[in-house]
Amino acid sequence: MADHPSASSAASSFVTYELRGNIAHIGLNRPEKRNAISDRFVETIAETVARAESEAKAVVLFGHGDHFCAGLDLAEHVKKTPIEGVRGSRRWHAVFAGIEHGTIPWISALHGAVVGGGLELAASTHIRVADKSAFFALPEGQRGIFVGGGGSVRVARLTGVARMTDMMLTGRVASADEAERWNLAQYVVENGTARDKAHQLAEAAASNAEISNYAVINALPRIQDMAKEDGLFVESFMASFTATSPEAEERLRAFLEKRAARLKAPGSA
Ligand code: 1HE
């Protein structure tokens, strides 16, 4: 299986990397294999996560070609030992955790196939924007395997376990609009515009206090795993920790001194 050559300023093959202001645009770049993720591809994603963490304030993740990502590279998995399979899955977990629980927000721009491991990757980003061409599926059952990139945790938490069970047992393919209703996508936009929308959202997120973004992407999901009283307790500490930073003081003063933009109701000028 031929590797796709390195493109633009990518750290290595499979992924393009471009810094637009303080937003990193990371493109899955193996379109001839529908961006199927091989072992080496996962390592390239890991390198790119580290690079974005060191120089960007937010990331837009997208796929080159007609699809976001066709999931696991099935060709590599025809023959693997059980321990190789476990190692591979645990590596996906570690790399995707670096996205989900890093220090900067990731917005995925989805089109075409968002399936199997591609959906697991999208589920590790913080906001998902789908264009109308996007379709979502978990065909692992049809391939005789199970999710291994964190889907049983992340996808099930987004959709609820009943929908994920349906997707896995029946091979049901969800449209972009269904995906939005199922909480797999937060925005549905016209074909070809997901990346622009994701960039806008990334700029909005990047303009927040970094410590607030850190709390949102690290504390919020952990609090969901806690008992109610524990969650409320941790929330108070996060609230106090963020609010007592010098940046919060400056931002609060900016609002009170009418130097900060006011919120606008949707649809108002
Ligand atoms: C692949 C892969 C892949 C395409 N691994 N090579 N994922 C799946 O079960 C989805 C499998 N893929 C598809 O259903 C279709 O390819 C698509 C709907 C995504 C796109 O269809 P299409 O008609 O545009 O492309 P194609 O002709 O099917 O594929 C083009 C090439 O990409 C072809 O290779 P070629 O050498 O014959 O040109 C395909 O073999 C190759 N290709 N998808 C390897 N996935 C951590 S656990 C996660 C578990 C999973 O992700 S399971 C779900 C796997």
Image: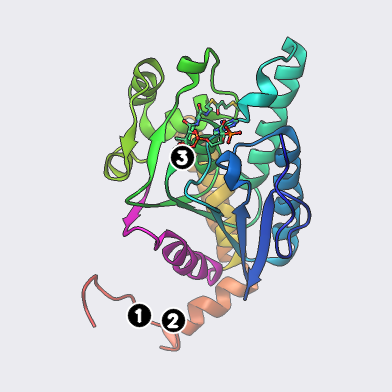
Which quarter of the rendering shows the N terminus?
top right
- Comes first in the chain, label 1 or label 2: 2
| Residue, disc 2 | 255
User: Which one is in front, 86 or 79?
Assistant: 79
| Residue, disc 1 | 262
Disc 2 CB within 8 Å of nearest ligand 1 atom: no
Image quarter for residue 61? bottom right
Is disc 3 surrounded by few (<14), some (14 to 19) or many (20+) residues within 10 Å? many
Report the Cα–Cα distance between label 1 and label 2. Answer: 8 Å
- Comes first in the chain, label 3 or label 1: 3
Give the residue drawn at x 56%, y 75%: 249
Query: Which percent across, then down, holds residue 102?
Result: 66, 50
User: Which one is in front, 14 or 61?
Assistant: 14
Query: Which percent across, then down, holds residue 199?
Result: 49, 66
148 lies left or right of 164:
right
Give the residue drawn at x 73%, y 59%: 10
Q: Is residue 189 magenta?
A: yes
| Residue, disc 3 | 114
Report the Cα–Cα distance between label 2 and label 3. Answer: 41 Å
* Residue range of the region highlighted in magenta in the rendering: 185-208
Total numbered circles: 3
Q: Is residue 154 magenta?
A: no
Type of amino acid at the residue the image marks with label 1: Arg
Nearer to us: label 3 or label 1: 3
Type of amino acid at the residue the image marks with label 2: Phe
